[in-house]
């Protein structure tokens, strides 16, 4: 048995997809929506996997270095293609490193529009 929390946050950023043969190779921006699913097997003394306030602060901190930036210029996207898939993976790794012991990232979905998103499951 486990419990899951879902935190959704937004940020704006531009990117261009390297070696892509189409419009997305040119610089363009998105109002990204990030869905973060966290889980734990046990509840803390307050009856929570973790406090939503703390979870949102961790996600906000993970997004801070990308909000209103050109992703291609920000590590690690200065080296890897800033696709939705790579963004979801990088955020999962950053967030996993910041959550309390016993809490894990289950999945992260990076939505570049209302209709298009990519999910990373560690």
Image (spheres, grey):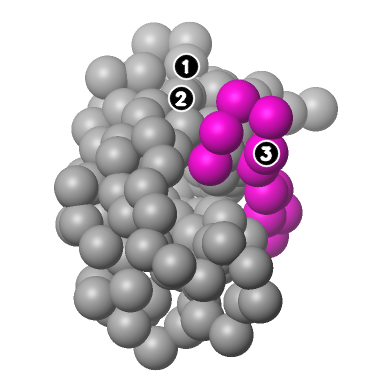
As drawn, 44 above or below 58: above
> Can residue 57 be found in the magenta stretch?
no
Q: Secondary structure at mark 3?
A: loop
Q: Earlier along the polypeptide chain: callout 3 or callout 1? A: 1
As drawn, 97 above or below 119: below
The residue wearing badge 2 is: 8
Residue at 27 percent across and 19 percent down: it is: 53
The residue wearing badge 1 is: 48
- For the question of whether residue 104 can be seen, the reply is yes
Quadrant for residue 115, please give it: top right
Between 51 and 82, the one nearer to me in the picture: 82
Magenta segment, principal secondary structure?
loop
Query: In x, y percent, where is residue 37?
Result: 59, 34
The residue wearing badge 3 is: 116
Residue at 32 percent across and 83 percent down: it is: 78
Residues in magenta, as a range: 112-122
Closer to the eye: label 3 or 1 = 3
Query: In x, y percent, where is residue 71?
Result: 31, 65
Quadrant for residue 110, please give it: top right
Q: CA distance from mark 2 to mark 1?
A: 18 Å
Q: Residues within 10 Å of mark 2 (few under 14, many from 20)?
A: some
As drawn, 108 above or below 27: above
Q: CA distance from mark 3 to mark 1?
A: 31 Å
Q: Is residue 89 left or right of residue 90?
A: right
Quadrant assignment for the C terminus:
bottom right
Circle number at residue 24: none
> Can residue 119 be found in the magenta stretch?
yes
Query: In x, y percent, where is residue 3?
Result: 66, 23
Q: Secondary structure at mark 2?
A: strand
């Amino acid at each position: 048995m486990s419990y899951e929390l879902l935190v959704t946050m937004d940020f704006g950023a531009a990117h261009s997809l390297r070696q892509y043969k189409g419009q997305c190779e040119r610089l363009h921006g998105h109002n990204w929506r990030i869905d973060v699913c966290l889980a734990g097997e046990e509840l803390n003394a307050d009856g929570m996997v973790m406090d939503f306030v703390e979870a949102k602060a961790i996600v906000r901190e993970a997004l801070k270095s990308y909000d209103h930036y050109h992703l291609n210029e920000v590590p690690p996207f200065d080296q890897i293609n800033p696709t939705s898939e790579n963004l979801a993976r990088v955020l999962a790794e950053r967030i996993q490193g910041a959550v309390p012991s016993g809490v894990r990232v289950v999945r992260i979905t990076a939505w570049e529009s209302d209709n298009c998103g990519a999910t990373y499951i560690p």
